[in-house]
Every structure is written in structure tokens, then in C-alpha cells.
Amino acid sequence: MRRNVRIAALIVAAVSVVWASLLLVFGGIDVVVAGLYARSHNFQHPARIAAAALLVFLLTGGVAVVRDALPKLVAAWVATRRVMSPLVAAALIAVATFAVTDAFCTTTAGGADDSGYVSQADRWLNHTLTPAQPWVAKVPWPNASWTFAPLGYKPIEGDPLMRQVPTYSPGLPLMMAAAKWIGGQARLFLIVPLSAAILVLASYGIGRRLAGPAVGLIAAWFMATSPILLLMSVLPMSDVPAGAAWMGAFFFLMGEGALAAFAAGLAAALAIVIRPNLFFLAPIMGLWFLIRRGSAPASFGRRLAHLMIFGLGVAPGVIFIALLFDSLYGSPLTSGYGRFADSLDWSHVGPNLHLYWHWALEVQATVTIAGLAGIVVPFVWPRDDARRAMIVAAAMFLAVASEYCFYLVFDNWTSLRFFLPVWALLALGAASVVAFVWTRVTGDLPRAAIAIGVVTIGIVGVHTARDRSVFALWYGDRRYIAMSEIVRRLTPPNSVVFAMQESGALRYYSGRVPIRYDSFDSQWLDRGVEWLAAAGVHSYAVLESWEIDKFRDHFPDQRRVSALDGPIVVYRTYQDRTPVYLFDLTTPPPMGVAPTVITETDPWRLRAMMPGPVPTLSFQSAR
């Protein structure tokens, strides 16, 4: 009996410790079991259970068991350290990064960026990148082509077929399209978590080549636990894939020979297709071939040949983007955003410098300060070639920082995502500082303190991500799919839905045509809804709670705004975050009729939902 109690207590203690650790790191777990909603957010409860179970274990003979097992545990630890090389440890960190970010990935074509990238992937697959919308030419209101463009797209001005072009660059959508073609809708969303794992491995590889495996492993740890990486790895956006491609290019750049130079060029080409505005990083990388020495110093002619090979690898990406931009936007130098230079201004520099520095210190202060020191202070690197490589790294970081300091001002910490293509350089710089200090201290206690500090920095990074709701985004973003599902179920096929934030998701999932209310003429809501009704088209509106006042303000003198007093559906998640409302603009319900309230208790069912039918309109009796 004592033995059985002891074993049971040990199992309970182990499970409780794991459960408490998960709650401590990720902030909470919400599950639906057999239709019942369960939540656990307080790590102290399982911690107390673990302590009580451990006490029972010790009182039922656990002390003797631990004493007898201690030599075996020490031997197992020594054996594990022998097997656990830095490369294996870095690989495990990369796998953990992939597993965590995939588990918490939103898997939703939601807001502007998310729906823009995901829907473009389907358009590439279906060979309908610029679909015709003939009905747009028939409506009477002004600016019609823009009102039918959901988030992530814009109309081709003057096009008789009223086609739309994507705003976002094609690199990530093409990778998503390939993943979906191979494995279906769910695989589409694996690209970004997989890119996060590659970025972690690239950080290790660069550090290992420049300063040894210890620096590589610390850099991988700092990168994997970076709050901005964790945030952007759970969203289907291009920042992490761009970072993985550029740091992959940097890794190959640090290699030897023509093949490494060509691989670096191909990786840079992919990075340019993903994020074309950072094309200038490729020529900066090219400087490496002029200043490097290498383990076997090559002649200047040989290094020049490798530079040309690197350029040959980069060329396909540049040519593809130039041809595509020329076809879609009328110029190889114009993207879906227009001319990037038009968004740059000296007046942005001061505010952006302050904001980026403030956010970087707020979310990862130690890595930011030590990382900058490691990039600009050459003596922390042990080898001459590593110091030369930091010249290239510093130039890359400065170039990216300069561009985005001139770019538009966004007052949100998530704008640190712009730096993800070079964020690993900060992690490498910080790792080099740690290694430099390590080699200059003696004694087990100081070195143990350094090791504990490195681990703590990573844990704090994950806590910061948790505190900023990174691991809670998924169930909130599933509202886009849920409301699109409701619209598809409750509205007739020949309908329009006035929306803004939900416009991309509605077009992708609901099979209904969205109309951007923020692009709709403020004096045309009443006439537009009446004209559509006469043409056999029913009008609805889908608004998130924060959009209702914006809708009212946009149409201050229109009678149809009164429909917002009586929603027909209110959708909310079990956390009651961001309620979404469905309104009937054509035939609002009578006053006093209660709306249908739908509370989502199982957002897991909405993971990676298939898109709906391609929306279209037919005007039966348009005047």
C-alpha cells in the first residue's frame, strides 16, 4: 500500500509541476471537453497540489527512493550532457519554437495582413490573382471600385473588368500556396512557425561559424524567446519568413566556396520576393566578399568571382519581382503600397527613434543593449573574420533601422516586427557579449550566475510575450471565421456586407461580397442600400464593437444608420473579447426585438477552416 501511494503521489506531483509550468509560461489554458468549457489560469493551484503530493511521496518512503536513485540520476545527467551537443540543443529549441507557435497560431485569414496573405495564396493556386468583377461597373455610387476592394487589395484604376490587385508582396503567399497544394488548408499556416524554427537554427549556425557553438546556442535561445518573434510567429504574416530568409542568406554567406555564395544569393532572392523593400540588404551582403579573409585566404579575383556567383543567385528574385510589379502596378519600382519612397519623411525620424528604442527596451532590454554592443564593439569577437562579419552585420542593421525610422509612425510595440529580418543580429551580438564575459571570469559560482542569467533572460522574454497576449490571440482571431460562418448561414447568396475590419475575412470565408464602408461616400448609404434592394441585393453590415461609432460618424446624416440600434446577431467568444455584430440594413428588425446572441465555446473547431465560394453579385433589375 505504501508503495502504491508513493507511486501515485509521484505521478500527481509530476503532472501538477508540468501543469503549473505551462500556466506560468503561457498564462492560462482554455479547453472544451465533451462540450464543457474548462479553464485554468492560476499556476498556484497545481503548484500547491504538487507540493502536497511531493510531501506524501516523501512521507511514504520517498526519501530512501531519492537517496538510492541519486547516483543513477547523476550518471544519467552526465550521459545526457555528452549526447546533448550544442547542435542538438539548438535543434530542440527550434523544434520547441515550432511546436509552441504552431499550437498557438491563429490559423485565420482575419485582419488586413492575415487575410491579404492567405487569400492571395488561394488566388495563386486558382490562377485568379486579379479576378474580374463586372458588377462593379453597374453600381451608381462614386468611387465604386474602391468600395468593393477588401483589406489587402486595391482596384486597377480605369480597368474595364474592374479587377483588383493584391497589396502584399507574393513571397509568403506563394509559399503558402505550395504548402496548401501539398497538404491542404491546415498546412498553409505551417509556413510561419516553420520559418521561426529556421530563424532559430540560422541564429545558431551563424554564431557557431563566427565564434563557436556556445555563442550559437545562446543566440538561438535569445531568438527563440524573443517576444516579437513569438508574436509574429503565431500570425500568418511575412515578417518571420523574411527574417528566416535573410538570416539563412547570412549563414551561407559565412561559408566557404562558390556553392555557399550561390546558396546565399538564392536565400537573399527569396527574402526579396517576400519583402522587396529590403532589397538593399543584398548589396550590403555583397561587401563581405570584398573584405573577408577566411580560413584559406583567397585572391581578390576569386572573391570577386564569388561575388558574381552570389549576384547570380540574387538575380531571379529581383527579376521576378520587377516583372510582377510592372505587370500588376505599371512599374517595376512600384509595389502594392505604391512607391515606398512616398512613405518616407524626415519628420518621422524623431518619433520613430524614440518609439523603437522605448519598445525594444520594454520587451527585451538586455538583449537589445548587449546586442548593440556586440555588433559595434569588435573585441568581443574572438576571430578576425568574425569582426569583419560584424561590419556587414552593423551595416545591415543600420540600413534597416534607417529605412523604418523614415517610414510611417505606428504607435504600437508590434512595429518592432519590421526589425525581424535583422533581429537575430542583436541576439548574436548579445551572445558574443555573454561569451566574452564568460571567458574573463573564473570560478564555478560566477559562471553559474551567468548561465542562470542567460536562462532567465529567455524565460522573461516568454513571460513578456504572455503578458502581451501573444498566446491568447488565436481564440480572439477565430471570430473572423465564426462571423463569416454566421453570415454565410443567415444571409442569401446575392447579398452585400458593409464592413471594414472584417472585409477580408468575409470575402474569403463567407461567399458574400463585402463593401468597404470606410471607402463608401458618406452621403450615399441610404441611396446605395435602396438601389441594391431594387436590384435584388440584400444589404447587411458586420461591425466589431469598436467600429459601430466609426460607422455612425462616417454616415452622420443617413437614415439607415438606425439599423445599428437593433443587431440581428451578436457574436462573442467565451472571454467576451471584441464582440462582433451583424446588422440588417435593408430590413432592420422592429424595435425591441432581441438579437440572437452566440457565445463561442469551442474555437478549436474553427482551426484552419476552408474558404467559402468565390463571391459574386447579379443585379436582377438594376436601375
Image: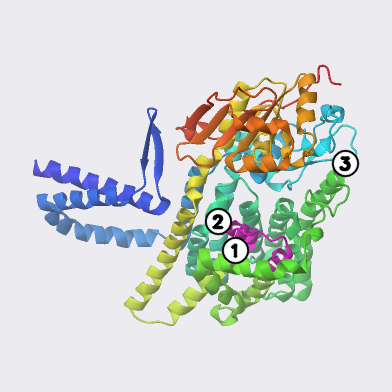
Secondary structure type for disc 1? helix
**Mark 1 surroundings within 10 Å by alpha-carbon count, few (fewer than 14), some (14 through 19), many (20 or more):** many
Asked if the magenta segment contains residue 416, the reply would be yes
Q: Amino acid at mark 1?
A: Trp
Coordinates of residue 278 in the picture (x, y in percent): 73, 60
Q: Nearer the viewer, mark 2 or mark 3?
A: 3
Q: Nearer the viewer, mark 3 or mark 1?
A: 3
Asked if 557 appears above or below 208 in the picture, the reply is: above
The label number, if any, that marks residue 157 in the structure image: 3
- For this rendering, which residue is in front, 617 or 441? 617
Asked if the magenta segment contains residue 424, the reply would be no
Secondary structure type for disc 2? helix
Q: Amino acid at mark 3?
A: Glu
Q: CA distance from mark 2 to mark 1?
A: 9 Å
Coordinates of residue 244 in the picture (x, y in percent): 62, 55
Q: Quadrant of the N terminus?
A: top left
Residue topped by disc 2: 229
